[in-house]
Amino acid sequence: MKLTQNTSYQHWLEKLKFSIKQAQYKASLSVNSHLLAFYWLLGKEIKEKQLNSKWGSGFLTQLSQDLINSYPEIKGFSLRNIKYIRQWYSFYNKENELGQQAVAQLKQIPWGHNIAIVSKSNTINEAIYYVTNTINNGWSRSVLVHQIESELWKREGNAISNFSEALPKAQSDLALQTLKDPYIFDFLNLTKTHNEKELEQSLVTHITEFLLELGAGFAYIGKQVALHVGDRDFFLDLLFYHTNLHCYVVIELKTGDFEPEHAGKLNFYIKAVDEQFRKKADEATIGILLCKNKDKLVAEYALSDINKPIGVSSYQLTQSLPENLKSSLPSIEEIEQELANE
């Protein structure tokens, strides 16, 4: 018997059409949230019907055709997108039902973002991390995909630092979240023998991509910023202000391995910035030392008796980013266009 002649299927299809009409009405008030609420319900029902009904392997194909025929003006009922809807719901229900707060978060980001996250994340915790950061930082889909592909989930907060000893707890916790290890400068084309001046200039030339890799809150102040101490002049590689931490951030670049004396020099720079730049409303200046390689134990020893807050991270140079950070995942429009051309 064809599904079109199956009474239970037809009954369920009519109920589904009624839900779609309701979703259409609500969408005029809040398009994304209500659309994704409907997708969540649809994914749940598809999963349940495939487990409990004997409608055969052509169920999703038939459903897609019926919905497209009934609502040709609505995008999103292609077979591929319906499979994405099922995948999206199934991903978050692999182990337990998500809490209502987590489900509400999913509905705050566009559908294309949701597809990117479930397609590229390995665990629910990782996925929720990217959902939360997308909401907090306003990431576009291409930026989101870049962050996932560069494994920000694994890199954030992993740098070696003395923040917990050198900063108050609230400031320390927030500062730790700003650090990554390694930082990935895959937007640079440098030779293996590049020096610190070349690295610094390239980062400034590509400041938009550099700020993206540093993370939300960093505001660029300048390079080779002059400090006058005693009768001598010193020059900071890079100086930033962090709008969330409310403090200056000194970044020193080293193209070789981390050495203990690097921490002492950065400690001196932070002291000078505190004296010469920091205002009464600013929090303590933070230093970040970026080096090509580091020995974890050596870095921990070097920071153990340093008074100023310093983080030590490595950096990597890899292949260039795709033009305009273009996502490899298709948009809903691209999916629909592809199917229309088949």
Image: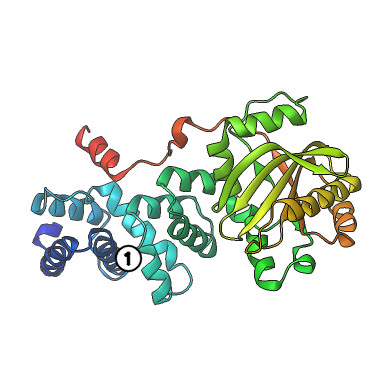
Residue nearest the viewer, comparing 173 with 110: 173
Question: Where residue 81 sits in the image (x, y, percent)?
Answer: 29, 50
SS assignment at label 1: helix
| Vertical arrangement, residue 10 with respect to residue 178, above or below | below
> Going 25% across and 54% down the picture, which residue do you hit?
60
Q: Residue at x 11, y 48 (%)?
A: 72
Residue 315 position by quadrant: top right
Badge 1: few (under 14), some or many (20 or more) residues near its Cα, within 10 Å? some
Relative to 56, 122 lies left or right: right
Residue 135 is left or right of residue 227, and the answer is left
Q: Closest to the observer: 53 or 213?
A: 213
State how many labels appear. Answer: 1
Look at the picture and state if 269 lies above or below 226. below
The residue at 69%/46% (across/down) is 182
Residue that numbered label 1 is attached to: 47
Q: Position of residue 76 (x, y in %)?
A: 23, 50
Query: What residue type is disc 1 on?
Result: Lys
